Amino acid sequence: MKKFCLIAFSLFSLAVSAQNTKLKVTAAAKADALQAKLVAWRRDFHQNPELGNREVRTSGIIAKHLQSLGIDVKTGIATTGVVGILKGGKPGPVVALRADMDGLPVTERVNLPFASKIKTTYNGQEVGTMHACGHDSHMAILMAVAEVLSSIKKDLTGTVKFIFQPAEEGAPYGEKGGAEEMVKQGVLTNPNVDAIFGLHINSSLEVGTITCRPGGTMAGVNDMMITVKGKSSHGAYPWQSIDPVVVSAQIISSLQTVVSRNVNLTQNPAVVTIGAIKGGTRFNIIPEAVEMQGTLRFFTGADEKLITQRVKQIAEKTAEAYNATADVKIPYSNHYPVTYNNPELTAKMLPTLQGTAGKDKVLQVPPVTGAEDFSFYQEKVPGIFFFLGGMPKGGNALTAPPHHTPDFFIDESGFTLGVKALCNLTLDYMAAAKK
């Protein structure tokens, strides 16, 4: 009897595997056929970017598309978020797939027929607006995935949640948003998500290539605000002042020792960066205060604690030495945990990525000090976040325009691989759960 059961189970597993292979072939063909639509969606989003928590036009287009596919759609989640629920023809696990929607306050400099000319207000200033991180491609890819999977709905063994998230780059100061708020509003429940997958285009990774690593993949991040207060005076009589500009300069120089002298870089990378300084109104007036904004990056809780403690200590004690004061707020407006790929799930799904792109085209790379709020989903359920090549073939990774810059550029020919990868991860995860 035992032998009979083993034979029956083996035959069942083979049948499941054969059916799943057939589904993946069908999905791949449908993905190829969607290339023109995918590019058109991306270009429309690129030409009409919207900042975090302002993605009204964007989310409307996405919701309309999902509804046209017969997908159950919920809107207005975490301000402008959209969630589509596709129930397969057979019971099974719930797989979530996520794309981010927001652009950045960057003025585009790329000579494209669909370049952004949009201007808007950010932090009280008129700014150019651009999809300078590739979120336009993420949305287009996931819209194509939704079209592919909805076309084979009756053969899906489970449910797919399509999560289109606002404000990945951070909600405007004083507002809530992004993945953290999506999670708080129940995006991973009703029905409960079993696993989540997401991708990010990479302008310095060649088209046709995927990178993925288990464990810490992208850094945790805290932003910070340091306000140095001194005493104002005429610039001609500096001895009558307590100069916060000079104090701030000393603080900035000393902060460089946090990474170079306090963090054990043989174990994990770390970053302390001051990215913005504001102080003074005129060349001959020493101001009363200077504000500095920056970012801290880390890969462990211990390093986060160490870096935060040392930044506060250095800022406060340096200011004290000059008879000034330093008020340090960490985090100031946002905090992202480490983007952590569940090792067991990553090992389980790595063959899927290799089978989609080719074994030699799926690379494991060192951790990235950029941050991603996809990490909030991974805190709740097992997840994998991987990078998709967007650099033209033969390009130079060292000179490719980086993300968040006016010259950011990606090659659209790599998008279909992203569609296939997300489809295959979904189908293989469901098939594995069925066995």
Image (spheres, helix red, strand yellow):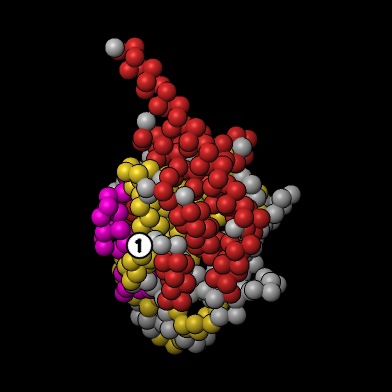
Q: Quadrant of residue 239?
A: bottom left
- The answer to which of 314 and 401 lies nearer the viewer is 401
Query: What range is drawn magenta here?
Result: 165-194
Return the x and y of residue 269 as percentages of the image width and height: 46, 45
Q: Amino acid at mark 1?
A: Asp
Residue pictured at 66% horizontal, 55% vertical: 413
Tag 1 secondary structure: strand
Return the x and y of residue 64 as percentages of the image width and height: 44, 70
The residue identified by callout 1 is 72
Few, some or many residues within 10 Å of mark 1 (<14, 14–19, 20+) = some
* Drawn side of residue 259 relative to residue 376, left or right: right
Furthest residue toward right: 394
Vertical arrangement, residue 36 with respect to residue 423, above or below? below
Whether residue 283 is in magenta: the answer is no
* Drawn side of residue 117 relative to residue 384, left or right: right
Q: Quarter of the image for the N terminus: give it.
A: top left
How many callouts does the rendering have?
Answer: 1
Main SS of the magenta part reads: loop
Residue 225: in sight, yes or no?
A: no
Residue pictured at 41% horizontal, 39% vertical: 429
Q: Quadrant of residue 10?
A: top left
- The answer to which of 309 and 354 lies nearer the viewer is 354
Residue 233: in sight, yes or no?
A: yes
* Drawn side of residue 239 relative to residue 202, left or right: left
Q: Quarter of the image for the C terminus: give it.
A: top left
Whether residue 188 is in magenta: the answer is yes
